[in-house]
């Protein structure tokens, strides 16, 4: 988990690969990001895929 969070922060890129690592360990990172932005999870997945979520934002919400 620390590796995924660290990579998102250092690269400033939130990717589904990194977020899925957190989800697999019981941290609903995509859900947290969706709630913080006021969108549903489907919209958040789309935003992440399009590179519209920074790694630093994801790191702050998931950590």
Image: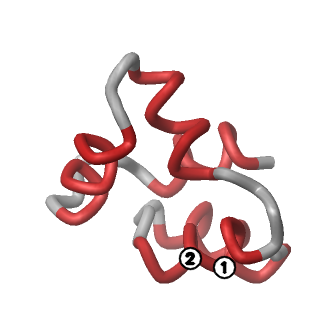
Q: Residue at x 51, y 37 (%)?
A: 33
Residue 58 drawn above or below residue 51: above
Residue at position x 42%, y 73% in the image: 16
Q: How is the image coloured?
A: secondary structure
Q: Quadrant of residue 8?
A: bottom right
Q: Disc 1 vs disc 2: Cβ atoms closer than 8 Å?
A: yes
Q: Which residue is mark 2?
A: 18
Secondary structure type for disc 1: helix
Name the residue rendered at 68%, 40% in the picture.
Answer: 60
2 relative to 15 in the view: left or right: right
Locate residue 59 relative to residue 31 in the image: left or right.
Answer: right
Estimate how packed mark 1 is, as few (under 14), some (14 to 19) or many (20 or more) residues with alpha carbons within 10 Å: some
* Quarter of the figure with residue 23: bottom right
> From what the image shows, is residue 13 above or below residue 28?
below
Q: Where does the image place residue 31, in percent across and percent down from the top left? A: 55, 42
Q: Say whether residue 32 is left or right of residue 36.
A: right
Asked if residue 24 lies left or right of residue 20, the reply is right
On the image, the x and y values in percent for residue 35 come to 51, 25
Q: CA distance from mark 1 to mark 2?
A: 5 Å
The quarter of the rendered structure image containing the N terminus is bottom right
Q: Residue 44, how many percent across, how many down?
A: 32, 44
Q: Classify 36 as above or below 1.
A: above
Residue in front for this viewpoint, 4 or 34: 34
* Residue at the disc numbered 1: 21
Q: Residue furthest top?
A: 38
Q: Report which quarter residue 10 is drawn in.
A: bottom right
Q: Residue at point 39% right, 17% down?
A: 38
């Amino acid at each position: 988990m620390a590796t995924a969070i660290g990579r998102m922060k250092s690269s400033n890129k939130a990717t589904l690969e990194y977020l899925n690592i957190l989800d697999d360990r019981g941290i609903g990172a995509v859900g947290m990001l969706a709630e913080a932005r006021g969108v549903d999870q489907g919209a958040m997945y789309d935003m992440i895929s399009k590179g519209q979520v920074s790694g630093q934002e994801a790191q702050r919400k998931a950590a």
